[in-house]
Amino acid sequence: MKHRVLVVEDNQPNRELLCDWLEAEGFEPLGTDNLEQAYAAFKNRPPDAVLLDVQLGAEDGLSLATWIRREPELRHTPVIAVTAHAMVTDQERVIQTGCNACVSKPVDFKLLRKHLQQWLSVASVLRKQTPAAK
Ligand code: MN
């Protein structure tokens, strides 16, 4: 079964690039360009993982990560932040909000693949250990 990956990125070329890459890698991508769409996607059918642009225009992408970590049913969902700047302070904030990993633009796809595989397998183990959460 294909893993569904939600891409939250307000820059269209970047979003398409990520979605095309995910599709080529055998994932089922779903692209959204703002937080409202991202929350709607979760309500509709929670994805297996999220690629999250930190800067969504005026919106703070990381607030989505904070929300996911507080939702009992969703909290194991792997969230990988995509940041425009490889600033150390940005990376700290990314990890503090509960993202599993951080990649900076331009995206190193080899690294992204490694993070996705690693955290999807961690999430599947955690889900089995906590039957209350699906
Ligand atoms: Mn952006």
Image (spheres, rainbow, N blue to C red):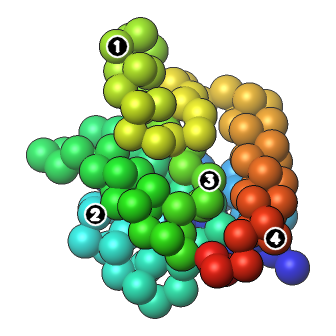
Badge 4 or badge 1: first in the primary sequence: 1
Within-10-Å neighbours for mark 2: few <14, some 14–19, many 20+: some
The numbered disc on residue 128 is 4
Numbered disc in front, either 4 or 3: 4
Q: Residue at x 35, y 51 (%)?
A: 66
Q: Amino acid at mark 2?
A: Leu
Image height of 31 relative to 44, above or below: above
Distance in Å between CA atoms under marks 4 and 1: 34 Å
Foreground of the two, 126 or 105: 126
Name the element at disc 3: loop
Distance in Å between CA atoms under marks 2 and 4: 29 Å
Foreground of the two, 58 or 64: 64
| Residue 1 visible, this orientation | yes
Distance in Å between CA atoms under marks 1 and 3: 21 Å
Q: Residue furthest top?
A: 88
Residue wearing tag 1: 89
**Image marks 1 and 3: residues in contact by CB distance under 8 Å:** no
Classify mark 3 as within 8 Å of ligand 1 or not, answering yes or no: no
Name the element at disc 2: helix
Image coords of residue 111 (percent x, y): 74, 29
In the displayed structure image, the side of residue 47 where residue 129 appears, left or right: right
The numbered disc on residue 35 is 2
Distance in Å between CA atoms under marks 4 and 3: 15 Å
Which quadrant of the figure has residue 32? bottom left
Quadrant including the N terminus: bottom right
Badge 2 or badge 4: first in the primary sequence: 2
Name the element at disc 1: helix
The numbered disc on residue 78 is 3
